[in-house]
Image (cartoon, helix red, strand yellow):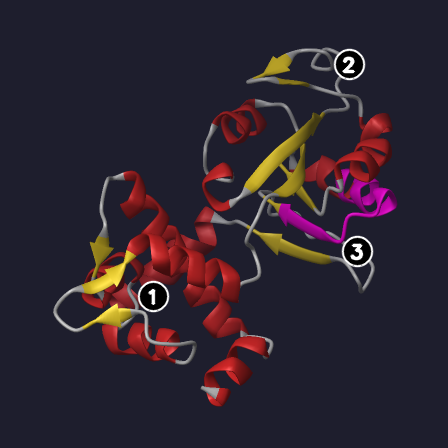
Amino acid sequence: MAREESLSQERLTVGVAARLSRYLQVLTQAKKMGRDSISSQEIGEYTNVNATQIRRDLSGFGKFGKRGVGYNIDSLIGEIRGILRTSGQHNIALIGAGDLGRAIASSTVFADHGFHIAGVFDSDPRKVGTQISSLSVQNPATLAEMVREKNIIVGVLAVPPAAAQPAADALVDAGVKIIFSYSDALIDTPPDVTVHRSSPAAALLYALYFHLT
């Protein structure tokens, strides 16, 4: 028991954290489909992670599954969110109200995992004041105030490459320490600010490599 508590308190390696996040994505979708349980083999089919590796990753934090039955989805979602320290709701700011920004704001992709889009911002005067779902697009000049009021911890960039750096600078100036970018632009930030990127091209290259080798 002491070993399990020790593991749960330690900072996860990048590999374990990445895999747990992928497992959580599968579990969340399975729950939306009405599933109550799932096996490590099924999780493996959707994540391309070996079932043995999945069981090893999870066994370091406790005994969650039953042989022949699998994992209870609700229980495992709660456990993984606790391990990843993502339980509860986290507010984010979305920068960009173009086609991509509107698609993101209208999707449940973030809400499914406890992220709430607290504000949408765009520097285009023609977009300011328009509605995206239940949110009114705001001028970036109000970003810092919104970050303080809503305790926003993550900024999401859905802007063209040329606008990525100025948008990131605005988030940094507002006090945001985590930036998630849908742009391939290389962004310079202070050492205490973390930038994560979502690149379909990189994912396709990764998939192609394993298909051809």
* Depth order, front residue of 21/126: 21
The quadrant of the picture occupied by the N terminus is: bottom left
Q: Picture coordinates of residue 176 (x, y %)?
A: 77, 48
* Depth order, front residue of 142/199: 142
Task: Name the amino acid, label 2.
Answer: Pro
| Residue linked to disc 2 | 125
| Residue linked to disc 3 | 189
Q: Picture coordinates of residue 29 (x, y %)?
A: 32, 44
Residue sitting at 26 percent across and 73 percent down? 50
Image: 124 above or below 112: above
Earlier in the chain: of badge 2 and badge 3, it is 2
| Residue linked to disc 1 | 209
Residue sitting at 78 percent across and 55 percent down? 188
| Residue 91 placement: quadrant | top right
* Depth order, front residue of 105/96: 105
Q: Which residues are magenta?
A: 166-180
Pointer 3 local density, CA inside 10 Å: few below 14, some 14–19, many at least 20: some
Question: What is the secondary structure assignment of the residue under circle 1?
Answer: helix
* Callout in the foreground (3, 1): 3
The quadrant of the picture occupied by the C terminus is: bottom left
